[in-house]
Image: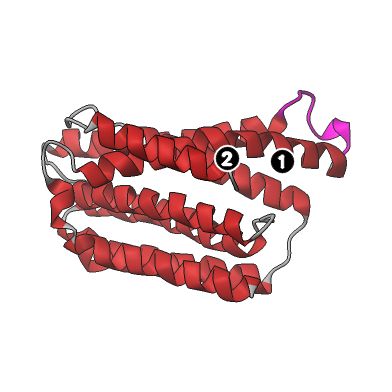
Amino acid sequence: MFYSLSFLFAIGFVVIHLSSKYMKFLSVIPRSRLLSAAGGVSVAYVFVHLLPELNHHDEVLDQVWESNYFYFENRIYLVAMIGLAIFYGLENMVKKSQKANNIDYATRGVFWIHISAFFLYNALIGYLLVDGVFENDTRMLFYFIALAVHFISNDHGLRQTHTEIYDRLGRWLLAASVLVGWILGQSIDVNEAAIAILFSLLAGGVILNVMKEELPGERESTFWAFAAGLSAYTLLLSFA
């Protein structure tokens, strides 16, 4: 049952990537209420689930590794910081490419670097569907909900950055990457320390992408939709 559910959610992620192209209302200014609510859900997921979960994974590393692996404490937060820094660097690269070429979209070479990073990001999300050590099916469902709405926002941002090449190639690669991750999760067993590191890298990437896509400065967000998504998802996590 667990593996069937994880596969169903992996397919759900694929459908979201392939169908977000047709959600034309996402491009409306002021910002779509759906995107604002998605921002609230993603922010709630970060603060109510991801950050506390990092503390648990730090304890896992303490149990699995000897103290001489790293001199300082809270090493898992360093890994999350590295994940955040990687995606910040990618966004900075995209902005510089646009500015240097005086265009609204990134160059082809930058597209391939950017989409490769998101391929790994999505594959990791698919992998953790199988090996994410969820306490129960409900926790996996909440993981799916949070990252599904996060994918909608990510797709919207990537489509704006890369225009037609994202719809022609990028969205298909990102859809496939979730299934690649899920298949790897089925076929490769890694230890708890590796899961902790993978989760922490993902956490850093999610935090950066949430702040970039779901709290935009250039668009007028719908605060009440954001607050509704934040409150509703926080309540759901509280009762999980």
Pointer 1: what residue?
57
Q: Quadrant of residue 112?
A: bottom left
With 61 as the anchor, is 173 left or right in this view? left
**What segment is highlighted magenta in the picture?**
66-74
Query: Residue at horizontal 23%, vertical 54%?
Result: 108
Question: What whole-number distance in Å separates the C-alpha atoms at marks 2 and 1?
Answer: 20 Å
Name the front one of labels 2 and 1: 2
Q: As rendered, which of 29 and 174 lies closer to the eye?
A: 29
Indicate yes or no whether the magenta region holds residue 67: yes
2 or 1: tag closer to the N-terminus = 1
Query: Residue at horizontal 22%, vertical 53%?
Result: 159
Look at the numbered discs 2 and 1 and tell me whether their residues touch, using CB distance below 8 Å.
no
Query: Residue at horizontal 52%, vertical 52%?
Result: 142
Classify 50 as above or below 124. Answer: above
Q: Disc 1 residue type?
A: His
Query: Residue at horizontal 77%, vertical 56%?
Result: 191
Element type at mark 1: helix
Q: Quadrant of residue 134?
A: bottom right
With 170 as the anchor, is 145 left or right in this view? right
Q: Badge 2, how many Cα within 10 Å: few under 14, some, many 20+?
A: few
